[in-house]
């Protein structure tokens, strides 16, 4: 059964059109916009430490369409999150470093873990909800890519490369999926958007993106994109790139400073054994071990700053000197382990186990859908990113809500099929 089919005399709640509810679409759109582009939130910050998207998310609950309320969710992500949230909260009196930061981080995580998943899963479970999420997120990514491109080619501005990388990793697979689904001017706009993202992310020198984006493309090719059109697309892109390289001088696109920056990052990637940042990240394993030796059960505080303030000193790792002094983990999983201890990490593993069980139950056919598979691929890319960058538990909940929305979609479609079968039996 496809989304949009009628069930008996009534339509499935998954057929709701989010664009028919402009206030709800606008408020929720701002949530997606700021989550994918924190630079916007920083520029429009109303109250310190409280993002505007938090207010927008709260207001969304006053304008929820009835169709969204009727979408069934067969589980509670909040229940999966509770063990971790409780341990992080109990830990607060024991925090040794950056107590204020940990308190703010815990309050923020409670808010997002309670408020975001119920709404996000229901909306993204619907076809128009996914289009709304992809479109608004794409706008946010294009803005941050343009912001970064401008800062890269001038001495004005300071846009975080990491924020751009997060957005591109999440949105690029969705953009590719909708390129195949669209036609005419919409497809052309998406292709241009694809090029803009690459024009910003490649010279940015985010080595994690250089590794993760090819993995995402490989997953798309193997599990999502129509095989008959992959070769045609590859040839088309190759011709386009070759044509551009012949007609356009690279110095017309990037400044000498930008090209120098790219060459430096490329050299560091090629000579990674001599790059101290690689060993510094690897040395965080030893720093985490030191933290657990001091606070094994509850860690030293649920915040990036708590981990960073722990003096790790200079350590030897695999024959290399790693300076892990007062630096954050650069790894979400190590940050959770060091920040909330063994008990917190076990609670986190419980949450992830519940997500993986449901993800395993997703029909393989779901991967083949061009408005479903790319969402999964983008989420997988973000989990790879978590291994080289520090994020909060609430960001993991956000990423998992995307995957669980697809499970909710599958559950409601099967529920509709059951209702239709029962109605047919009664009519016989």
Image (cartoon, rainbow, N blue to C red):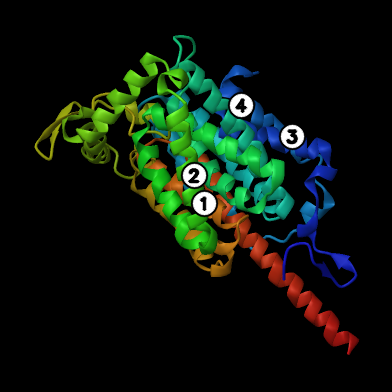
Does residue 143 appear left or right of residue 162 in this picture?
right
> In the rendering, which numbered label is found on residue 51?
4
Q: Residue at x 69, y 49 (%)?
A: 183
Q: Nearer the viewer, mark 1 or mark 4?
A: 1
Q: For residue 75, say whether it is visible.
A: no
Report the label total.
4
Q: Mark 1 or mark 4: which comes first in sequence?
A: 4
Q: Residue at x 66, y 67 (%)?
A: 411
Residue 343 against residue 283 in the figure, above or below? below
Dot 1: what SS? Answer: helix
Q: Nearer the viewer, mark 1 or mark 3?
A: 1
Marks 2 and 1 sit apart, C-alpha to C-alpha, by: 6 Å
Task: Return the x and y of residue 75 as percentages of the image width and height.
Answer: 62, 61
Q: Nearer the viewer, mark 2 or mark 4?
A: 2
The residue where tag 2 is placed is 237
- For label 3, the crowd category at 10 Å Cα-Cα, with few meaning under 14, some 14 to 19 and many 20 or more, is many
Q: Nearer the viewer, mark 3 or mark 2?
A: 2
- For label 4, the crowd category at 10 Å Cα-Cα, with few meaning under 14, some 14 to 19 and many 20 or more, is many
The residue where tag 3 is placed is 27
Q: Mark 3 or mark 4: which comes first in sequence?
A: 3
> In the rendering, which numbered label is found on residue 233?
1
């Amino acid at each position: 059964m496809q989304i949009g089919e009628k069930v008996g005399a009534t339509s499935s709640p998954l057929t709701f059109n989010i664009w028919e509810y402009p206030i709800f679409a606008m408020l929720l759109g701002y949530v997606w916009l700021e989550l994918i582009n924190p630079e916007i939130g920083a520029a429009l910050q109303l109250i310190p430490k409280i993002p505007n998207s938090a207010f927008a998310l709260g207001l969304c609950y006053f304008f929820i369409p009835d169709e969204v309320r009727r979408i069934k969710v067969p589980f509670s992500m909040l229940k999966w999150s509770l063990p971790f949230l409780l341990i992080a909260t109990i830990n607060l009196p024991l925090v040794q470093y950056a107590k204020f930061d940990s308190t703010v981080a815990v309050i923020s995580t409670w808010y997002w873990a309670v408020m975001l998943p119920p709404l996000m899963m229901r909306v993204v479970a619907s076809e128009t909800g996914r289009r709304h999420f992809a479109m608004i997120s794409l706008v946010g990514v294009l803005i941050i890519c343009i912001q970064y491109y401008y800062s890269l080619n001038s001495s004005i501005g300071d846009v975080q490369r990491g924020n751009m990388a997060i957005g591109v990793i999440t949105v690029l697979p969705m953009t590719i999926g909708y390129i195949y689904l669209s036609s005419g001017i919409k497809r052309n706009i998406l292709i241009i958007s694809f090029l803009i993202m690459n024009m910003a992310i490649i010279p940015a020198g985010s080595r994690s993106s250089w590794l993760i984006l090819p993995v995402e493309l490989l997953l798309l090719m193997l599990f999502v994109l129509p095989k008959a059109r992959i070769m045609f697309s590859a040839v088309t892109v190759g011709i386009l790139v070759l044509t551009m390289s012949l007609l356009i001088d690279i110095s017309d696109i990037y400044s000498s400073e930008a090209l120098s920056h790219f060459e430096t990052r490329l050299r560091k990637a090629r000579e990674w054994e001599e790059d101290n940042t690689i060993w510094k990240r690897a040395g965080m394993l030893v720093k985490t071990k030191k933290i657990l030796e001091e606070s094994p059960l509850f860690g030293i505080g649920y915040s990036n700053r708590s981990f960073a303030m722990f003096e790790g000193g200079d350590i030897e790792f695999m024959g290399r000197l790693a300076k892990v002094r007062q630096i954050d983990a650069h790894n979400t999983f190590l940050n959770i382990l060091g920040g909330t201890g063994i008990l917190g990490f076990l609670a986190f593993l419980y949450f992830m186990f519940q997500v993986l069980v449901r993800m395993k139950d997703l029909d393989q056919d779901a991967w083949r859908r061009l408005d479903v598979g790319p969402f999964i691929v983008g989420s997988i890319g973000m989990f790879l990113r978590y291994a080289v960058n520090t994020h909060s538990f609430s960001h993991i909940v956000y990423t998992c809500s995307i995957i669980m929305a697809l499970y909710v979609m599958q559950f409601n479609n099967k529920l509709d099929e059951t209702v239709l079968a029962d109605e047919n039996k009664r009519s016989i």
